Image (cartoon, rainbow, N blue to C red):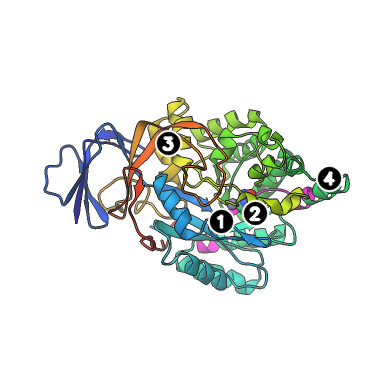
């Protein structure tokens, strides 16, 4: 099967060129001006951009949380991803206490197999560590699961001690894994939560008030200090506070290899969302919480300067009925919000259309850098001969209004309800197959495959 994408403007992290793209089977075979070759299918991309498929390296599909699970499974979540221009995800597979990492890997493989419509990999969340689990980390790296997440928050549930985080970092120095850190000071937050509840403060806005920016900045500094001890790189997930970014930028200035991501919600939404009427604020209960508006400009600047390299979503949706679990106690509201479908449009609109950064930087933070950091490049993350034909025909002039009435995520609210964005995904190819045709999903469940990833330093 040969597909020719003609008349478009091909954008990579480094170049913007008028070029055609020829796809044979699952791969791109040529990128060049006026490729006049016979094809089984021709896609006219006139007046549109041809981008490498988006890569969302932070999703939580079908993931257990207290007594419930996130509301998108691998089918509904990846259909929404595809419609939004994302063709690869890296989801978090959790080792719950008492389980081996292999058990967690097998559980998440079963959740994804036969359902995912775009390619997927896993980061393994490590909640317990001993010599056996360290050996398992080595096995998983050999099997292509080359990144792990550790929590400094949620004591007694997910948190790993500093001693064990240091151990995981040291092991990653040997096996080439990347350690991703959720940097919030769990014990301090828990003390503030107990204090708030004791004073009768149960409303959603206390979620944010008990997780102040200082708890994120302190944990970020501690995580970086541990990485310095271990002499390994570290990746900080979902940076929300300018103070945490200052810690990251300072470390990078000193030559410490700290990598970091932020998410659209921290770039575009702010703590005012917690002041909605009634229980509305529960929609925005996520960790870290939304911050004061003044944090947004530094985060955008961090993406421009390179102190932040990635925009991921932390897509972790819960329906309004699920959020009700915390009606009388904000600490029982399931943490997380939807975003897998809206990332590309929001970052294009806020980043490129608003003039904050170039088209190339947009491609870099949504696709190329995630591919490079997490061992997928050049198979994914660029438009070049030899790469997978994961391609997005993106209309930079089209407008859309984000709404729960029209989105495809399996959740009954949209954090950006009513917001207009300019820049919309039109057509999507995943490994050469058209899975979104002019905004309509035309793929099938199970057409996504597991992505084994390279370790750091691997060729
Ligand atoms: O609130 C959030 N972010 N839920 C997902 C879990 C996590 O910490 O990433
Ligand atoms: Zn997290
Ligand atoms: Zn997360």
Q: Tell which tag, 3 or 1, sits nearer the viewer.
A: 1
Q: Eyeballing the image, is 207 above or below 72?
A: above
Say whether disc 3 or disc 2 marks the residue closer to the N-terminus.
2
Q: Magenta residues, as a range?
A: 174-189
The residue identified by callout 4 is 196
Q: Position of residue 315 (x, y in %)?
A: 54, 49
The residue identified by callout 2 is 322
The residue identified by callout 3 is 362
From mark 1 to mark 4, how far is it between C-alphas?
Answer: 29 Å
The residue sitting at the top extreme is 355
Disc 4, SS: helix
The quadrant holding residue 277 is: top right
Residue drawn at x 63%, y 32% is: 295
Say whether disc 3 or disc 1 marks the residue closer to the N-terminus.
1
Q: Tell which tag, 1 or 4, sits nearer the viewer.
A: 1
From mark 3 to mark 1, how far is it between C-alphas?
Answer: 29 Å
Say whether disc 2 or disc 1 marks the residue closer to the N-terminus.
1
Disc 3, SS: helix
Q: Position of residue 177 (x, y in %)?
A: 52, 59
From mark 2 to mark 1, how far is it between C-alphas?
Answer: 9 Å
The residue sitting at the front extreme is 405
């Amino acid at each position: 099967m040969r597909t020719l994408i003609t008349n478009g403007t091909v954008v990579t992290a480094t170049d913007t060129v008028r070029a055609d793209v020829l796809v044979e089977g699952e791969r791109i075979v040529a990128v060049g001006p006026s490729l006049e070759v016979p094809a089984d299918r021709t896609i006219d991309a006139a007046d549109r951009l041809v981008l490498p498929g988006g890569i969302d390296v932070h999703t939580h599909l079908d993931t257990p949380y207290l007594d419930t699970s996130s509301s998108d499974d691998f089918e509904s979540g990846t259909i929404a991803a595809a419609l939004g221009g994302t063709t690869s995800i890296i989801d978090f597979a959790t080792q719950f206490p008492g389980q081996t990492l292999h058990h967690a890997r097998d559980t998440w493989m079963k959740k994804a197999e036969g359902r995912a419509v775009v390619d997927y990999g896993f980061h393994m969340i490590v909640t317990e560590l001993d010599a056996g689990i360290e050996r398992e980390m080595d096995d998983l790296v050999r099997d292509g699961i080359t990144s792990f997440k550790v929590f400094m928050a949620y004591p007694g549930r997910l948190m790993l001690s500093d001693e064990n985080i240091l151990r995981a970092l040291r092991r990653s120095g040997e096996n080439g894994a990347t350690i991703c850190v959720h940097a919030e000071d769990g014990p301090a937050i828990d003390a503030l939560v107990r204090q708030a509840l004791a004073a009768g403060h149960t409303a959603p806005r206390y979620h944010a008030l008990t997780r102040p920016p200082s708890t994120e900045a302190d944990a970020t500094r501690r995580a970086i200090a541990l990485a310095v001890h271990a002499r390994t790189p570290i990746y900080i997930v979902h940076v929300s506070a300018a103070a945490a970014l200052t810690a990251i930028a300072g470390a990078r200035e000193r030559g410490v290899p700290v990598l970091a991501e932020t998410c659209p919600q921290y770039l575009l939404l702010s703590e005012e969302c917690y002041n909605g009427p009634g229980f509305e604020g529960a929609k925005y209960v996520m960790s870290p919480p939304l911050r004061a508006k003044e944090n947004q400009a530094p985060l955008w600047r961090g993406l421009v300067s390179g102190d932040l390299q990635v925009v991921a979503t932390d897509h972790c949706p819960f329906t309004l009925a699920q959020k009700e679990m915390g009606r009388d106690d904000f600490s029982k509201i399931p943490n997380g919000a939807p975003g897998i479908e809206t990332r590309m449009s929001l970052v294009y609109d806020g980043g490129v259309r608003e003039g904050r950064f170039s088209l190339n930087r947009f491609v870099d933070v949504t696709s190329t850098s995630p591919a490079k950091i997490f061992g997928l490049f050049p198979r994914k993350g660029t438009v070049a001969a030899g790469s997978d034909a994961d391609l997005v025909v993106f209309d930079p002039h089209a407008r859309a209004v984000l709404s729960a009435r029209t989105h495809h995520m399996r959740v009954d609210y949209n954090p950006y309800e009513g917001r207009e964005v300019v820049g919309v995904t039109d057509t999507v190819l995943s490994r050469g197959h058209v899975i979104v045709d002019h905004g309509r999903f035309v793929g099938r469940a199970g057409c996504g495959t597991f992505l084994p990833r390279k370790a750091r330093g691997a060729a």
